[in-house]
Image (cartoon, helix red, strand yellow):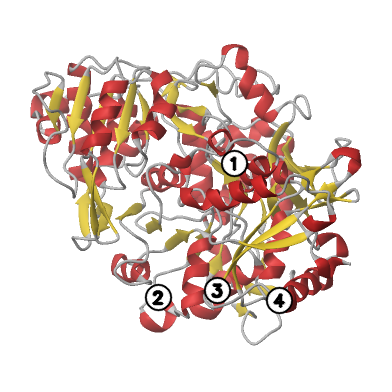
Amino acid sequence: MANRAEHMALRDGDLLWSPDAARRAGSNLAAYQHWLKDRHQLEFADYMALWQWSVGDIESFWQSLWDYFGVAASAQPRTVLDSRRMPGANWFPGSRLNYAAHVLRNEDLEGPALLYVNETHGLQSLSWAELSALVRSLAVQLRASGVRPGDRVLAYLPNIPEAVIAMLATTAIGAVWVSCAPEFGARGVLDRVTQLEPKVFLYVDGYRYGGKDFDRRAEVRQIIEGLSGLALIVHVPGTGPAQPAAEAPDPRMRSWHSMVAENIAATRDFQCEQVPFDHPLWILFSSGTTGLPKPIVHGHGGILLEMLKLLHLQMDVHPGERVFFYTTTGWMMWNFLASALLCKACPVLYDGHPAYPQLDVLWKWVEASETTLFGASPSYVDLLRDAGIVPGERYDLSRLRTIMPAGSPVTAAHTAWFYQNVKGDLWVATGSGGTDCCTGFVGGVATLPVYAGEIQAPSLGVAVRAFNEGGDSVVDEVGELVITEPMPSMPLYFWNDPGDRRYRESYFSMFPGIWRHGDFFRINARGGCFVLGRSDATLNRYGVRIGTAEIYRALEAIDAIADALIVNLDLPGGKFFMPLFVKLEDGVELDEVLARRIAECLRREYTPRHVPDRIIAVPDIPMTRTGKKMEVPVRRILMGVPAAQAAHRDVMANPDSLQHFVDYARTQRDYSLPSARISHER
């Protein structure tokens, strides 16, 4: 294996790692290509040729996945795709299947189905037999309680086995899974789910995080009071006070234990509900950084095929391997993690603070669980890097083969950190996609090299392009990330969206019939991909569009800066104002010397257009709970939008951080005045 990350001046495009012949030959991707050759006489010179086929002949590609993975359906489809229109593509019409059934068909496997750990207890396991028995028992009880296909089941649960069990039981009977992590306040939950009118509510009354117990009984009461259609309320044991949330006996209340107490006769005869391919599976929510979160409805068949493809072919997950991604139940990566069960792999669930009681606690559990694929956000890498932690020196990571950074743009420095501090023989499979389709659009390819600053390639079946403003596909230029052909896991619709108005406005208003995702994107001639920040947070200087990730990448070289956020404001008369907000390391002051150093760095690394109009020190940078910088809400606040309208505090990791931007906007009445510019720019 080649590892060139150490002892070098790292530049975008530098080779960091290459898979050896054994790894390429043993990959799931290679096995699939052998199958295509044997079954269909299809042979491809390289990955990009395979990708071109997958997005050019999409019907044949998705049919091949149906056959290759042995999708079990009680009714076969009439065709693969009735038309290629977006939105509105109708995949595998006439088929009937069930997502959870494809997990339960693995129930005779030996070994653990789930591994789980929290701040109180060490690593524990649940066997395949135990998991399947609990899923069937809960599913039988839900049916007996009157839950029918299409009913919504709301969970207010942390990342614990009960959440996975409840999701599988819900989807097994054709009901629709809806999840909000318990760190959300009552208002944040109700904003999301009131319109969904859930019939069932599963909750914990407390959880532990960072060594502290958080009592959620008050929030649970508010949620119950705000949901008039609840017919069943299930208390799940948590790490907080073990008391019911209701102040008086409620006939709708049941305990988790009573819901999963196995009835052998009933569970023996249990059969998963066979539903149409596009029957609702679960509802995920957009980040909600602006406006109410969008309730995104995904279907059984689309998610089943997409997750099988993503986990097997893009992430190279093999049966029996352990998959560990630090996530909460409120992020799509939890759905990805739980879906590892589809490929006979074992999810590792962690419930707690990622840096408690020690900064590298997650690596402790990577070792103990013998994790093969580990994933976390780039902000977690920043935390470890700043602390000087070298996991490869502290832990036995011999089983670890793959790292998956996701959640926000990943820089070359992030990628190199893994090779320098974890191990040299490591596949860093950076991905980028979205909750919207619950998958990655671009990501890892086990048979390709890893280059600094690049995501390896577009994912199979994802016709991702960079479009300029005229709607032309461009290479080696920054454009809008678009998808030109439909995918099975695209949203069926948004809940409570008459005429699909909000759905169409969100993705299809700029380029009719083309999915526009809202990210700046660049793809190079060899297929390497760069996701450069949200296009809604456009930095447009003198007609040149700049991705915010470029700014942040350059600033990593300045030790005095702990974090940063940049926006661009369009002003009357064709003018603009581009402030850079910096969070400084302890003891550092923003003076002219540092400001000049920042400007010179940006000018040197990129162009004079990258130099901000003013640099402002702030105590903290607003972030979502999934680690994304809240550029769009900050931009709206600076343009005069009230903070309550610009951002929902419940989706934020640090809601108090907004106040400084509110104060700044109040004092700067006219951004075009000279006083609003940094002096070193002149």
Instruction: Give the SS element for disc 3.
Output: loop
Given contact means CB atoms under 8 Å apart, are the residues at marks 1 and 4 in contact?
Answer: no
Location of residue 456 by image quarter: bottom right
Q: Residue at x 82, y 67 (%)?
A: 679
Amino acid of disc 4: Leu
Q: Nearer the viewer, mark 3 or mark 1?
A: 3
Indicate the position of residue 393 as horizontal and vertical percent values: 41, 84
User: What residue is shown with label 2?
Assistant: 398
Indicate the position of residue 35 as horizontal and vertical percent values: 57, 47
State the CA–CA distance, disc 4 to disc 2: 43 Å
State the CA–CA distance, disc 2 to disc 1: 36 Å
User: What residue is shown with label 1?
Assistant: 39
Horizontal side, residue 341 vs residue 9: left or right: left
Instruction: Give the SS element for disc 4.
Output: helix
Q: Nearer the viewer, mark 4 or mark 2?
A: 4
- Looking at the picture, tell me which residue is in the foreground, 177 or 191: 191
